[in-house]
Amino acid sequence: MPRRRGRRPGGADTRAELLAAARVEFAERGYDGATVRVIAERAGVDPAMVNHWFGGKDSLFISALELPVDPTTILAEVVPGDPDHLAERIIARFLELWDGTGGAPLSALLQSVATHDIAARLLREFVERVLVARVVSTVAPDQAALRAGLCGSQILGLAVVRYVLKVEPLASADHATVIAAVAPNLQRYLTGPLP
């Protein structure tokens, strides 16, 4: 029996079905191995629905992560500019976002990653595909993958200590203090010499 094309009748939650199918496919096959066609099949819809709801595989992947922010927007804001001050822009933007949401969505994501293999794999793919490909490789003189891992450890470490564990005085430190303390090390990971 041929599959019906297009949207489901009666306004069924196609978007939610696509997200659920995408999480399974990305977790099982990784970003590169997952295909829009198979995700759509798993969700029981036409592959065109991925473009309709998400605009493509990249956006579907980011949505499947359930990040509290759109990383594409952040990248457009922090990457342009002097590469020697990229770390300052990254830390400043993340602090704005995290503090703007009270840190709750980020805390939930980090706790999910710590307890669920699927969430951890999805976040790992995100770090590899977004941090390495779109941020670190644009400024790194060498070893982009290692630099991305180091950057991730710095940013996620800051997130855990400030928003999950709420260790004082870092948890309540003003942005200028955090940027001044953390950005130099992050900048070294981005562009400085590594062993």
Image (cartoon, rainbow, N blue to C red):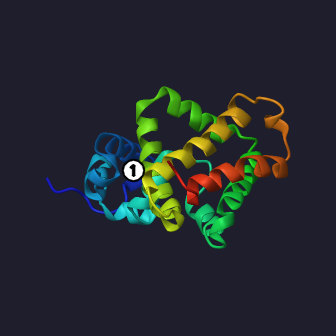
**Whole-percent x, y for residue 44 in the image:** 29, 50
Residue 23 location, quadrant:
top left
Compared across the picture, whether 106 is left or right of 24 comes to right
Q: Is residue 15 visible?
A: no
**At x 51% / y 62%, what residue is drawn?**
140
Q: Give the x, y percent position of residue 45.
A: 31, 55
In the picture as drawn, the residue positioned furthest to the left comes out as 1
Figure disc tally: 1
User: Is 13 situated left or right of 8 in this image?
Assistant: right
Q: Nearer the viewer, residue 13 or 178?
A: 178
The residue located at (51%, 34%) in the rendering is: 113
For residue 160, what is the image quadrant? top right
Crowd around label 1: few <14 · some 14–19 · many ≥20 (10 Å) = many
> Picture coordinates of residue 155 (x, y %)?
62, 45
Residue at 32 percent of width and 45 percent of height: 25
Residue 91 seen in the current view: yes
Of residues 145 and 135, the one drawn nearer to the viewer in this rendering: 145
128 w.r.t. 164: above or below: below
- Three-letter amino acid code at the position of disc 1: Leu
Front in this rendered view, residue 84 or 166:
84
Residue at 73% x, 36% y: name it: 162
Relative height, residue 96 to residue 172 (above, below) = below
x, y percent for residue 15: 45, 52
Residue pointed to by mark 1:
18
Q: Relative to residue 65, is residue 110 depicted above or below?
A: above
Dot 1: element: helix
Left or right of residue 94: residue 110: left
